[in-house]
Amino acid sequence: MGVGRTGAARPDDVAAQPRLRAGGARQRRAALAHHRRRDAAEPHGDHRLELRRHRDRGDPHPDDARLRGRDAHHALELGHDPVLGAEPERLPGPLVVVPARRPVHRARRNGARARQLRHRRVREPAPAQCGQACPRAAQEGLHADRRDRRRHHGIRRDRDGCRRRRGGEGVSALPSGFLFGAATAAFQIEGAAHEGGRTDSVWDAFCRVPGAVIAGDDGEVACDHYHRYRDDVATMKELGLGAYRFSTAWPRIRPGHGPVNPEGIGFYDRLVDELLGAGIEPWLTLYHWDLPQELEERGGWASRDTAFRFAEYAVDVHAALGDRVTRWTTLNEPWCAAFLGYAAGAHAPGRQEPAAAVAAGHHLLLGHGLVVEALRAADPTLSLGITLNLTVVDPVDAGDPGDLDAVRRIDGQINRFFLDPLLRGEYPADVREDLAAVWAEGLVQEGDLATISTPIDFLGVNYYHGEAVSLQPAAPREALEAPTDRPTSTPFPAADGIFFHSRELPRTAMDWEVQPEGLTRLLTRLHEEYTAPRGTALYVTENGAAYDDEVAPDGSVQDADRVAFLEAHLAAVADAVEAGVDVRGYFYWSLLDNFEWAWGYAKRFGIVRVDYATQERTIKASGRRYAELIESVRSGLAAKR
Ligand code: FCB
């Protein structure tokens, strides 16, 4: 996610556990064989994309190119504001920046650097200019150029009168071995919050804080996945998912961080077996924000000790499941855990202490590094990674040094605070400087950065939307954050004077802007600047949208907006793959409608609807469309188009 969840976009907010089951070796062999087959099928690990440094491209301001970031650089190339345009009223439609591709064969023939991305300025046609009369054209914002117009009209359409074509148009660049999955998280779906020995996490406690979560919702029942996991796995199989990204609940496995709870680990033991039995790869995340409340009471992530407790818990989970699970993600979105949890107070544990947030950020990273070291030592064949929420930050006025500095600061606090220590072994100097007032002396101890930058196999990217920032005040917007009664603060300790602007982009029910091209740019930047040099693969581990779904009289859910969102973002991933970016998989968020943190159950992200009164599941039109696309890529049909 980006900052939208918290309302930071509002100007006024700137203010050694025994193996549990027999037969493990057989399953493990099967899992390894599966991975070997998959790896053989993944053809693009050779990092053909040459690194392109800003100074190599004649950046007019080489001294501060790094500070401004790649996006600002592109904006300068354009000559002016890529977001709104310098003189928006004279333009027939909003300006967007899209990656322009040179066909690969031509690049090769020319002997030119293969598959480089160029950015160019294009003008999004107003709806009336769209070649076909399409009532959704204004909302989708997908046809920024001819290629995108084709994509827009290539997608299958439904009752709104627009034509739809079946098949894999837009995803033809994805190789047949590309991994498709869906994601969830323990607290958001499991329920059974106090069954089987599970005790409180920080989120259970936070849900009880008056006014912290919309409608006082909690995770007591959620999607009751704890009891319905078999049916849910059957649904995944029906959709044709190749992998399922889920998280294990620390307070279920080690309640109160006490001894391992056999009943707790037993649940994941059964879930993993069910997945493997259905031919679905388990993609396990060790931490998706549900810290045992007892550890919060001992300082939480602001305390260095928590990083070591996290490593203990991880080793226990691995001891129980490591014979069958090969994909291990340490953390989900440490930015949210640290800065929404400890600075904004919008997420559990609800603290509003910027220095504690910076400490939490470092300790989460340290915990990640300790786990990578420990699991690598336990089994060098594991595939290990971390998932970050990353974004593209654009200046509102690319000619304004103040806006460019705003880009630098926000990019620094969301993206580079995590990317640089993980993949370069250092915190960026400018970020340290910006955060100096809240960066405790002695926070980073000797050896921490070496641990944090222990090589990983993959970087998980969660992308929801981009940001447009400026020092100029933004026009007032609708509330972006969960309109909770409990006041929150900014998650950015160093964002004084920065305003988050809206653009003329379509929006989801979270009021998050729909910006698929941002995903292509983000993946390309990550590949060029961070992952390719280290041989680290990229996976999109979350991307999705909430919409106000309606159930038709026949019980179906025709979520056309989500279908369009999914298609546009998969096409954006395909664009990156076609440009040579080593991205190997995509997980839609989320498999099921679920507990959306401070929003409670008010927002629905699922490709499968959950009726919370009956716990009935209904595959939405988006789920059906995802299944079609998965099948077309897997069978190679998409590529033949
Ligand atoms: C991400 C979270 C996930 C979900 C989506 C919408 O930031 O990782 O749990 O809430 O946003």
Image (cartoon, helix red, strand yellow):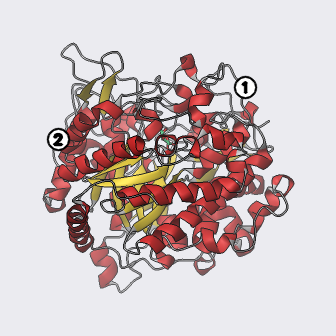
- How busy is the neighbourhood of tag 1: few (under 14 within 10 Å), some, or many (20 plus)? few
Cα–Cα gap, marks 2 and 1:
43 Å
In which quadrant of the rendered image does the C terminus lie?
Answer: bottom left
- How busy is the neighbourhood of tag 2: few (under 14 within 10 Å), some, or many (20 plus)? some
SS state under label 2: helix
Picture residue at 26% right of the left edge, 30% below the top: 620
Asked if residue 235 shows in the view, the reply is yes
The type of residue carrying mark 1 is: Pro
SS state under label 1: loop
Picture residue at 44% right of the left edge, 46% below the top: 248
Q: Which mark is residue 487?
A: 1
Asked if residue 425 shows in the view, the reply is no
Q: Is mark 1 within 8 Å of ligand 1?
A: no
- Judging by the rendered image, the residue that carries numbered circle 2 is 238
Residue 371 % position (x, y):
53, 63
Q: Nearer the viewer, residue 539 or 132?
A: 539
Asked if the residue under mark 1 is in contact with the one under mark 2, i.e. CB atoms within 8 Å, the reply is no
Image-quadrant location for residue 400: bottom right
The type of residue carrying mark 2 is: Glu
Residue 595 % position (x, y):
46, 29
**Image height check: is 476 above or below 107?**
above
